[in-house]
Image (tube, rainbow, N blue to C red):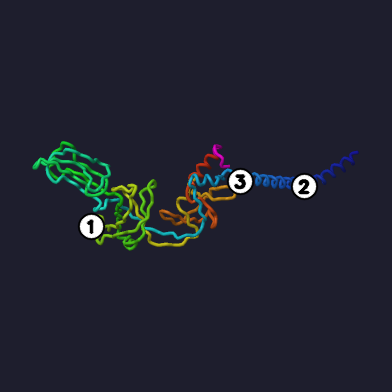
Amino acid sequence: MLKLNKIMIALFIITAPFLYGCASEEQPAKTEQHAEEDQHNDHDDAEAESAEEDHRDIVKLSAGELKEFNIRLQTAGPGKLETHVQLTGEIIIPPDNLAHIHPRFSGVVKEVRKHIGDHVKKGEVLAVIESNESLTDYKIVSLIDGTIVEKHLTRGEVVEDGSHGFTIANLHTVWVYLKVYQKDLPYVRKGRKVIISAGKDMPVVQSRIDYISPVMDEQTRTATARVILKNPDDLWKPGLFVTGEVATSTSMVDLLVPKTAIEEIEGQPVIFVETPEGFVPRIITTGKENTLNVEVLSGLRKGERYVSSGGFTLKAQLQKSEFGDGHGH
């Protein structure tokens, strides 16, 4: 019996390492299989999350809604990008569009018919004065069509010098005086195209340089470039500070879009691109730019249709959809 027990103990000692090794080999295989399954599950979760993200970021608008909200589309493609030199300046009244009108003779003001802000026609009566010499009435009339911008005359007042009267300005056309520093003189020429702007809430207009002063100002060490602007709506007010960008060179870029196409979402510049499912915001990388246009380096492909203006409507719809208050997804 003792001999049999010794034999069994010996067999156990011999076979134990083998059994332990098999178990150890099976365990890593099982762990590797589980890791592969976990990785596959993670991939599925990522795809599902990505699909959900794409679904959330799609904005759907009908053709009628695009027209209603004045949303414009363009096809992405190359274009000419002009580089500019930036000049500062201000709006002034052309001297020939300004009239200072004063009483010809001393006397007493009997009537004041026009006031600051009134539009008047040439020959229209502004005031009536009784002359001190003849004791007869005479009329003060406007010498130009325009708007009264100053008035120094009241009824019953005695006028004896040129400090009394009206100032009338015709603002349908205004001038822009731009300061040109010495370093910019080689690029600023008469006839060069210039883009005038005065802040984000003002329109951006294009015109051309009409005149450059032949001498430099001794105090500012600048020349003056004059630009003529039409001003039918009186938006360009005298004294308004403006910026003028004068085109200096032109280069071709692969993708050129107007700046009106770019919106900002979570601090990133995006463009809304048309897809079969709807409009998708794409994060873009930009390159060279000017006041009106910008080069797109990535995020947009040639031939794709994108929102060139009115993208703020899609941005608002996207934000509403993210809060569950819209129909964009």
Verify CB contact (< 8 Å) between mark 2 and mark 1. Answer: no
Looking at numbered disc 2 in the image, what kind of residue is underneath it?
Gly
Instruction: Please tell me the numbered disc located at residue 21.
Output: 2
Mark 3 vs 1, N-terminal side: 3
Identify the residue shown where x is 24% and y is 47%. Answer: 168
- Does residue 266 appear in the picture of this structure? no
Mark 3 against mark 2, which lies toward the viewer? Answer: 3
Q: Which residue is under mark 1?
A: 218
Q: Is residue 4 above or below residue 212?
A: above
- Does residue 317 appear in the picture of this structure? yes
Residue 147: image location, x then y, percent: 27, 45
C-alpha span from label 3 to label 1 = 65 Å
The residue tagged with tag 1: helix, strand or loop?
loop
Residue 12: image location, x then y, percent: 83, 43
Q: Which residue is under mark 3?
A: 50
The residue tagged with tag 2: helix, strand or loop?
helix
Residue lying furthest right: 1
Looking at numbered disc 1 in the image, what kind of residue is underneath it?
Glu
Residue 68: image location, x then y, percent: 49, 44
Q: Is residue 255 above or below residue 36?
A: below
Looking at numbered disc 3 in the image, what kind of residue is underneath it?
Ser
Position of residue 284 in the picture relative to residue 93 (left or right): right
Mark 3 vs 2, N-terminal side: 2
The N terminus - image quarter? top right
Q: Which residues are magenta?
A: 322-329
Residue 284: image location, x then y, percent: 51, 52
Q: Is 195 colored magenta in this rendering?
A: no
